[in-house]
Image (tube, rainbow, N blue to C red):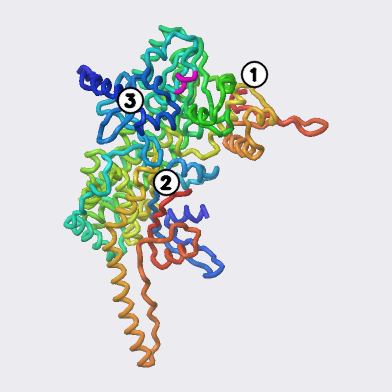
């Protein structure tokens, strides 16, 4: 299912799904957008260990707010909607219903500023990736979002087939703002998966061992993890290259110990 | 420019009057809440100069600190509501009182003012106690650092125990970050992070919950013995390496709004007054629906790739009170005439198709024209549903707006 979602995000030429009741359904360059909302607690509860690496999370533009930015208003204090403004906006939106299928290109100036931005985003990402290893995936998707926003803004503005410098600047401004949200969430570990703290705990237990090694029983004892929880954390750590398994064959069961990679 | 002093004579006067109110109005719901929810006693509140005041049309427990004043009460379902008096600088100081820093050999640092007072009630005679003003901070400010440093120089503590949140990975990591920062300030002095959640096997997350579950003093002592020793971790998290952007960077600024196309600006202007949803939550849902409306009729070919306006966005909030769903509804609302226009377009196309079909049948002619598709903007919320695939097949572009996001 995750692969299908990723294919849809990339609006691939052909995406096929075989269903029991409706046979085979083929989608050609489907455009599926998504706008959703959640609390941090719920989000972290629902994440499984695979999401962080699947690329799914990196495709979602997060907007994160911790506190109110407006004064609280009681329902009875809310004003009536501005009908004139509503009509002005919807008139513009209605024009988009009958758009013809056409490719869009970038004006020379738009191309130039996009290229510059892309380079500077890349540099910033490389710098940030020293402290935030996950940022690269988010930044690379954000580049594509820059073009998507510019495309949308151009259609709202003039429905021309060439993206203007002005709309490209707006798209870049929006992406930079969203990049702040991505960084903030990564800085605060909000986008880490739910087993991440377990992994850190395992790391810190091993770190505290004098000889830098610890066996499974000791890990269980010190972490208070269940067998399943410990296995999951250890697997993730080994897979990510933070911990290595040291197996010593004996006459009976092999002796398995764990150490941090690069520490010993 | 000299920094404005928060504690003006007027504000001091408000607190003084409020302290009297606190003594006189012990049946007031604010005091009852502090007693019942937070286990705080009147003499403790008194020691910390707390007051009962009216601000912003509401009665609050005022909790003063050096650079401001926290306002605390509970809402009708008992959730804590925390604000600060105007011009407060909550990241510039710690919360404490004279009696809580007497020169004992250990220093306890609590996660917020209420927990500071609770620790004071429990251990006030044997340890010194201070607290953070802002719960959930991940760094001490420069002023907090220098204040703490001077306190440590003056008092010469033998150890520091931190009672911070550790009940989720996020809070644990943030607390560890602060603990390591403190360790860097004080060097050789031992610093411990007391992980209440871990110690109680997930039953309690803080001192308040331990108190509610009647944890005895021996258990607290044993919890201290099992606290995590904090080591300096310069290689991973030196302050130079971490570029922490502040909450301010998350806010929409005028310069960005000015750049946006008129329609987006108008949408913000239209929707913003209609609720107290942060404006920050308004833009991306609006653009996601626009992406679905434009669909694959506009695309950009760059190099070997084709880019369609596929937008995936999620609004995240620390709590459930920031009206995220309202932000989604407002975006949907502005597209209502578009939805209606699509519907009426379908109806007229269908009527025309039906008419043509009838004529063909009447004339015994073959009729191959496909039935018009009822176009819509919104699709099912889960892409695992068969209806999702059918709807996307028929419409070619859709937007899903699930009220609760799951990866």
Label 3: element kind: helix
Above or below B93: residue B25 = below
Q: Is residue A78 visible?
A: yes
Relative to the observer, which residue lies in front, A121 or B378?
Answer: B378
Q: Residue at x 43, y 54 (%)?
A: A10
Image quadrant for the C terminus of chain A? top right
Q: Are marks 1 and 3 in contact (CB under 8 Å)?
A: no
* Chain ID of residue with mark 2: A
Relative to the observer, which residue lies in front, B278 or B257?
Answer: B278
Distance CA(mark 3)–CA(mark 2): 39 Å
| Residue where numbered disc 2 is placed | A38
| Residue where numbered disc 3 is placed | B22
How packed mark 1 is, by other alpha carbons closer than 10 Å (few <14, some 14-19, many 20 or more), is: few
Q: Position of residue A123 (x, y in %)?
A: 37, 34
Above or below A47: residue B344 = below
Label 2: element kind: strand
Q: Are marks 3 and 2 in contact (CB under 8 Å)?
A: no
How packed mark 3 is, by other alpha carbons closer than 10 Å (few <14, some 14-19, many 20 or more), is: many
**Residue at the far right in the pictured view:** A251
């Amino acid at each position: 299912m995750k692969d299908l979602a990723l294919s849809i995000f990339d609006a691939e030429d052909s995406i096929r799904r075989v269903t029991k009741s409706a046979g085979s359904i083929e989608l050609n360059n489907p455009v599926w957008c998504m706008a959703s909302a959640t609390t941090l607690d719920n989000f972290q509860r629902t994440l499984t260990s695979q999401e962080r690496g699947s690329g799914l999370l990196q495709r979602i533009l997060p907007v994160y707010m911790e506190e109110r930015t407006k004064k609280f208003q009681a329902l009875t204090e809310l004003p009536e909607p501005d009908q004139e403004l509503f009509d002005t906006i919807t008139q513009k939106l209605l024009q988009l219903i009958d758009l013809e299928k056409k490719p869009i290109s970038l004006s020379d100036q738009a191309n130039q500023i996009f290229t510059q931005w892309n380079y500077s985003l890349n540099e910033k990402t490389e710098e940030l990736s020293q402290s935030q290893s996950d940022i690269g995936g988010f930044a690379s998707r954000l580049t594509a979002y820059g073009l998507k926003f510019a495309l949308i803004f151009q259609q709202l503005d003039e429905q021309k087939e060439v993206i203007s410098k002005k709309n490209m600047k707006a798209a870049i401004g929006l992406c930079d703002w969203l990049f702040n949200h991505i960084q903030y969430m990564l800085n605060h570990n909000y986008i880490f998966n739910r087993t991440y703290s377990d992994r850190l705990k395992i790391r810190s237990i091993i770190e505290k061992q004098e000889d830098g090694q610890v066996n499974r029983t000791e890990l269980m004892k010190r972490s208070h993890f269940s067998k399943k929880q410990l296995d999951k954390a250890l697997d993730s750590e080994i897979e990510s290259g933070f911990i290595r398994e040291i197996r010593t064959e004996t006459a009976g069961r092999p002796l398995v110990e764990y150490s941090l990679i690069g520490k010993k | 420019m000299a920094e404005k002093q928060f504690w003006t004579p007027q504000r001091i006067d408000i607190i003084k009057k409020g302290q009297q109110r606190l003594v006189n109005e012990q049946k007031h719901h604010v005091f009852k809440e502090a007693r019942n929810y937070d286990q705080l006693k009147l003499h403790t509140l008194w020691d910390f100069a707390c007051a009962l005041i009216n601000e912003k049309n509401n009665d609050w427990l005022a909790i003063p600190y050096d650079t401001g004043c926290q306002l605390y009460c509970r809402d009708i379902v008992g959730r804590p509501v925390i604000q600060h008096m105007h011009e407060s600088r909550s990241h510039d100081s710690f919360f404490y009182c004279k009696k809580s820093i007497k020169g004992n050999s250990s220093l306890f640092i609590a996660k917020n003012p209420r927990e500071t007072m609770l620790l004071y009630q429990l251990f006030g005679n044997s340890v010194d106690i201070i607290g953070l003003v802002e719960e959930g901070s991940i760094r001490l400010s420069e002023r907090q650092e220098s204040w703490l440093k001077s306190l440590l120089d003056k008092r010469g503590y033998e150890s520091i125990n931190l009672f911070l949140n550790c009940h989720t990975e996020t809070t644990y990591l943030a607390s560890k970050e602060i603990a390591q920062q403190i360790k860097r300030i004080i060097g050789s002095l031992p610093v411990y992070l007391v992980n209440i959640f871990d110690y109680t096997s997930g039953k309690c997350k803080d001192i308040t919950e331990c108190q509610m579950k009647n944890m005895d003093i021996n258990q607290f002592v044993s919890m201290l013995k099992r606290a995590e020793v904090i080591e300096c971790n310069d290689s991973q998290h030196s302050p130079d390496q971490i570029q922490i952007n502040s909450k301010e960077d998350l806010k929409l600024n005028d310069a960005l709004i000015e750049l946006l196309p008129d329609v987006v600006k108008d949408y913000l202007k239209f929707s913003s007054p209609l609720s107290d949803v942060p404006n920050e939550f308004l833009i991306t849902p609006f653009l996601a629906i626009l992406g679905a409306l434009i669909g694959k009729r506009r695309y950009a070919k760059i190099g070997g790739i084709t880019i369609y306006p596929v937008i995936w966005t999620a609004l995240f909030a620390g709590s459930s009170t920031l009206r995220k769903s309202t932000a989604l509804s407002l975006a949907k609302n502005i597209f209502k005439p578009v939805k209606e226009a699509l519907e009426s377009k379908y109806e007229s196309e269908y009527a025309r198709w039906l008419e043509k079909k009838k004529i063909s049948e009447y004339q015994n002619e073959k009729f191959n024209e496909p039935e018009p598709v009822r176009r819509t903007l919104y699709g099912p919320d889960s892409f695992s549903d068969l209806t999702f695939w059918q709807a996307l097949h028929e419409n070619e572009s859709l937007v899903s707006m699930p009220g609760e996001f799951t990866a």
